[in-house]
Image (spheres, rainbow, N blue to C red):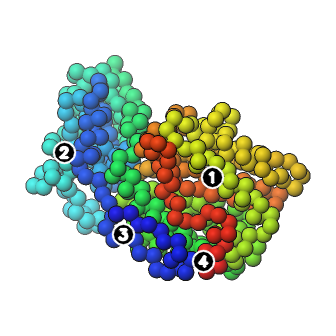
Amino acid sequence: MRFVFAFAAAMAVAPLVLNARAPSIPQSEYAARRQAVRRDLKTVLVAFGRSSDEQEQLRSGFLQESYFYYLTGWTEPDAAILLTKDDEEMFLPPRNERYERYYGHKTSPTDADATAVTGFKKLLPVSEFERELFRLLSANKTIDVIGAESRSQGIKQLLAFRPGVAVEDAAKRIDALRAIKSPSEVAMLHRSADVSLAAQAHAFRLAKAGEFEYQIAADMNKTWQDEGCEGPAYTPIVASGPNAIVLHYAANRRQVQSGDVVVIDAAAECSYYAADITRTVPVGGHFGARQREIYDVVLGAQQAAIAAVKPGMLIGRKDTKGSLMQIAYDYIESHGKDLHGQPLGKYVLHGLSHHIGIDVHDPGDIMQPLKPGMVISIEPGVYIRDENIGVRIEDMVLVTADGHRVLTEGLPREAAEVERLVRR
């Protein structure tokens, strides 16, 4: 199922053939997620999908709200669900001929195949939502709400006429479930990672003087769209020369110059699951001596942190004893100096890690122990403004029962291997 990156083929810039059939998550898994939420539910839980904002769709297309997608797998707009301990209901908009003329067929609750398509046995039109909610509130004094902010705000206004009913955020109830990825989700993340590796390998060959940052970004975008993915998991960062010290640089307008390094922080989103990968590459295929020195420090910090990933570890902060972040920070602080002879720790400007899943920054507490099934980034970076040197290296790591597995191992990280891939 999983495409294994062929390093030798990449060295020769051979065509990269990925798995033509993407993995998927069965409806039964979405139903099991809702059942897990309902099991201990003592309230009414409302989850809203994203609305059909036509201006937004014209600009960037429709993307479902991530919590709603996690619970339903539903990718059409204007839906909502009500969950209680004993029941679940989905609400869909009626058929809208004008809307469908522009955006295509959408399922309505009266369609003959609606139950099979949605996975919900109880389907109602959205016009019935308020009535059903008030019916359920006759036995509940609290409502948990999650989803599209404007619609959630409408619930609060609606309940102003029902004094005594408390509104709470349901996100934390679901966050613990989202943090642990199922085998199906891990397969989805593998797919997104593999497509992203191929895109980065293609982009390496454009790391040469005269190219523009946007050309490198466009090359990656073509690769993941050729593989049927929706597009980037986040705004691609292609930061050359002085732009490499800007953490979330996204203009991508500069022309690459000889002697630059280029921070390429870009990855695909495939079937709603995000990848997150960063490499720092030398223009023309050769790091300068100082660039190589800083690169090796960052790589050493990443290797030390990855080696320590296992259940029970904390991502933590740089002052969290024994945490992954402290391991990486201490390595950087004790290896290498700036031009003034000072340690490099002060040039560590961001955290080491975050959770990855449906969102590129998926729910997950960096101060809670890691558990098997979590997928996290490991991304140390050093950014020295006085030298216009920025280096970041990022990989996706799956926490396993007895340690970890790097999902993005196929793309070179060692400086000499990166140089060879850029040159060829």
Which marked residue is nearer to the observer: mark 1 or mark 3? Answer: 1
| Closest to the observer, 135 or 331 | 331
Quadrant of the image for the C terminus? bottom right
Among numbered discs 1 and 4, the one appearing first in the sequence: 4
Residue 248 image label: none
Which marked residue is nearer to the observer: mark 4 or mark 2? Answer: 4
Name the amino acid, label 2: Phe
Q: Say if mark 1 contacts mark 4, CB within 8 Å.
A: no
Among numbered discs 2 and 1, the one appearing first in the sequence: 2
Asked if residue 65 can be seen in this view, the reply is no
Residue drawn at (67%, 46%), measured in percent from left and top?
A: 328
Name the amino acid, label 4: Arg
Among numbered discs 4 and 2, the one appearing first in the sequence: 2
Residue drawn at (38%, 56%), measured in percent from left and top?
A: 188
Among numbered discs 1 and 3, the one appearing first in the sequence: 3
Q: Secondary structure at mark 2?
A: loop
- 293 over 81 or under it: above or below: below
Residue 205 image label: 4
Residue 120 image label: 2
Q: Quote the CA–CA distance across marks 2 and 3.
A: 31 Å
At which x and y percent is residue 341? 88, 50
Name the amino acid, label 1: Gln
Residue 303 image label: 1
Judge the density around disc 3: few (<14), some (14-19), many (≥20) Cα neighbours within 10 Å: some
Q: Say if mark 3 contacts mark 4, CB within 8 Å.
A: no
